Image (cartoon, rainbow, N blue to C red):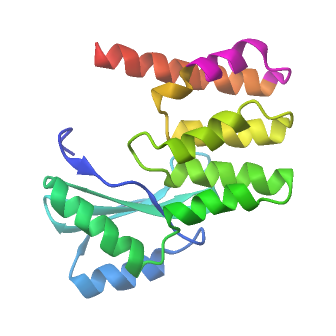
């Protein structure tokens, strides 16, 4: 993929195994399977890539961490990618941005909140979005380690630089060793991003 290609946000689907649903629609459009990646146990997620042409592609991924699948579109034409995102969101009945926010706000247990935060990270816009950021950054300071873990996972999917200081705080001082280690990994990713931008 050309580094200058445009990319949509991840469109979160409503189940883990949704390939048949996605495949049926892209076949209607005349898109062809470009690549299938079947992972070894514990390796990268299962992925299928369809192509409308060499410059417009749809990636389908089954994400075992989020326990959902998602798709995203990449292409040489940013306007076409944006229009395709809207069409695929509607036709695949993907979880909308408002629904992702509502899931966080309406969670009735710590487990539900942790899972909703993770999914919000998966499906968040690619560019900084205050609605998502405010909920995830607050959850990174939640008294429950389960909720903090869900929020950290969310950051791994949507690593906006605005999270960096809070992630560093967790890596240094969270009472849970597992979360300190996880935050350390995320902090390293932020450092790599900064090095890449220099």
Q: Residue at x 57, y 26 (%)?
A: 186
Q: Is residue 185 above or below residue 92?
A: above
Q: 107 or 175: which is nearer to us?
A: 107
Q: 90 or 98: which is nearer to us?
A: 98
Q: Residue at x 39, y 22 (%)?
A: 193
**Do we see residue 100 in this rendering?**
yes
Could you tell whether 169 is left or right of 188 in the image?
A: right
Could you tell whether 181 is left or right of 32 in the image?
A: right
What residue range appears in magenta? Answer: 165-177
Q: Is residue 34 above or below residue 65?
A: below
Q: Is residue 167 magenta?
A: yes
Q: Is residue 124 above or below residue 47?
A: above
Q: 33 or 188: which is nearer to us?
A: 188
Could you tell whether 75 is left or right of 90 in the image?
A: left
Tell me the quadrant of the picture where the C terminus can be found. Answer: top left
Q: Residue at x 13, y 60 (%)?
A: 54
Could you say where residue 134 lies in the image, as x and y percent from the top left?
A: 60, 39
Numbered circles on residues, count: 0
Provide the major secondary structure of the magenta segment. Answer: helix
**Do we see residue 153 in this rendering?**
no
Q: Is residue 194 above or below residue 182?
A: above
Q: 4 or 113: which is nearer to us?
A: 113
Could you say where residue 49 lies in the image, as x and y percent from the top left?
A: 32, 63
Could you say where residue 72 lies in the image, as x and y percent from the top left?
A: 37, 59
- Give the quadrant of residue 11: bottom left
Q: Residue at x 42, y 19 (%)?
A: 192
- Give the quadrant of residue 47: bottom left
Q: Is residue 28 magenta?
A: no
Could you say where residue 117 lies in the image, as x and y percent from the top left?
A: 66, 49
């Amino acid at each position: 993929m050309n580094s200058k290609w445009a990319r949509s946000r991840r469109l979160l689907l409503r189940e883990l195994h949704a390939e048949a649903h996605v495949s049926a629609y892209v076949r209607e459009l005349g898109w062809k399977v470009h690549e299938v990646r079947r992972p070894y146990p514990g390796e990268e997620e299962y992925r299928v890539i369809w192509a409308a042409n060499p410059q417009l592609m749809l990636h389908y991924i089954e994400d075992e961490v989020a326990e959902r699948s998602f798709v995203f579109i990449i292409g040489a034409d940013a306007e076409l990618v944006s229009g395709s995102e809207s069409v695929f969101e509607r036709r695949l009945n993907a979880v909308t941005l408002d629904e992702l926010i509502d899931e966080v706000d309406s969670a009735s247990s710590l487990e539900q909140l942790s899972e909703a935060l993770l999914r919000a990270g998966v499906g968040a816009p690619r560019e900084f979005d205050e609605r998502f950021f405010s909920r995830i950054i607050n959850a990174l300071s939640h008294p429950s380690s389960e909720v903090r873990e869900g929020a950290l996972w969310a950051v791994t999917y949507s690593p906006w630089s605005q999270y960096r200081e809070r992630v560093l705080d967790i890596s240094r001082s969270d009472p849970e060793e597992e979360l300190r280690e996880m935050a350390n990994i995320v902090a390293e990713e932020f450092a790599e991003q900064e090095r890449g931008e220099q």
